[in-house]
Image (tube, helix red, strand yellow):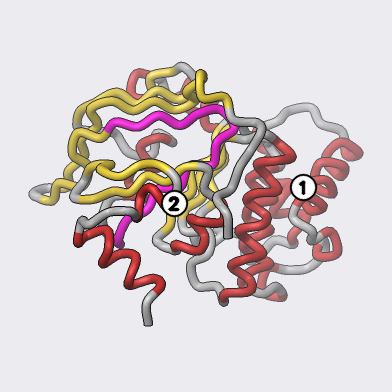
Amino acid sequence: MEDKKSNHINRQEAIISIRGLYKSFGDLHVLRDVDLDVYKGENLVVLGRSGTGKSVLIKIIAGLLKPDAGIVTVLGQDVAQLSTKELDQLRLKVGFSFQNSALYDSMTIRENLEFPLVRNVRNLSRQEIDRAVEEALEDVGLGQTINQMPSELSGGQRKRIGIARTLILKPEIMLYDEPTAGLDPITSIDINNLINEVQEKHHSTSIVITHDLTCAKMVGNRIAMLLDGRFERQGTFEEVFESDDERVQAFYNYNFVT
């Protein structure tokens, strides 16, 4: 697989900018002096072993956790300084695709997709709601599931519906938390292709949290690897793994060497 390219990346415009970020939980120092820029139209993959702070990072970006120190700027706004109302408005522009898809089991697929739309966008007609739901389902290739229940779908289909529910609000930023976790290799490739299709169609800016190197190689315009709480390796897939660092090699071998 070749490195993924995109004509939509503007490396002069940082949509997310992080400087001097620290986050600890008691004596556990998860993020230590993290600096990071994510550019408009870019798929940035954040790699790291379990427990290295990858999910903590995107929760801070989304304003779900507060940093101990440092500045996190999203779409020009300092997240830590926003009021509750301002944070709610920012989150409408930031789509969060959860690892477990986070669908409501008691709702049909249509109702799952309608829920964030009706809750956050006022005065929509029934026709506008139907059109938005159908478009979001078409984006993920699952228009036929509209009246099904989540329990009737496969794991890969639920992942796709979770992404559709995020896309329905047309966010400028997509945050994917372990999008291929628990999926078989073929379904994982389908999800990776979907992430690329979302980027190309919507020109979205994305952070993809994963420890799956196949995912990283397929979707990442740039890779940033968390090692001991810092981004010590950044670049293309090849640039990140052209290293004698034993921590980097061990991570690669765990994924690719049997």
The residue at the point 74 percent across, 55 percent down is 140
- Circle 2 residue: 237
The magenta region covers 35-51
> Is mark 1 in CB contact (under 8 Å) with mark 2?
no
Q: Residues within 10 Å of mark 2 (few under 14, many from 20)?
A: many
For residue 253, above or below residue 33: below
The residue at the point 74 percent across, 46 percent down is 114
Q: What residue occupies the far bottom of the structure in this picture?
A: 258
- Circle 1 residue: 136
**Earlier along the polypeptide chain: callout 1 or callout 2?**
1
Q: CA distance from mark 1 to mark 2?
A: 31 Å
For residue 237, above or below residue 132: below
The residue at the point 63 percent across, 45 percent down is 166
Coordinates of residue 223 in the picture (x, y in percent) = 42, 46
Q: Where's the C terminus, which quadrant?
A: bottom left
| Dominant SS type (magenta) | strand
The amino acid at mark 1 is Ala
Inspect the magenta stretch and tell me whether residue 143 lies in it.
Answer: no
Element on which disc 1 rests: helix
Q: Which residue is at the front of the view, 188 or 69?
A: 188
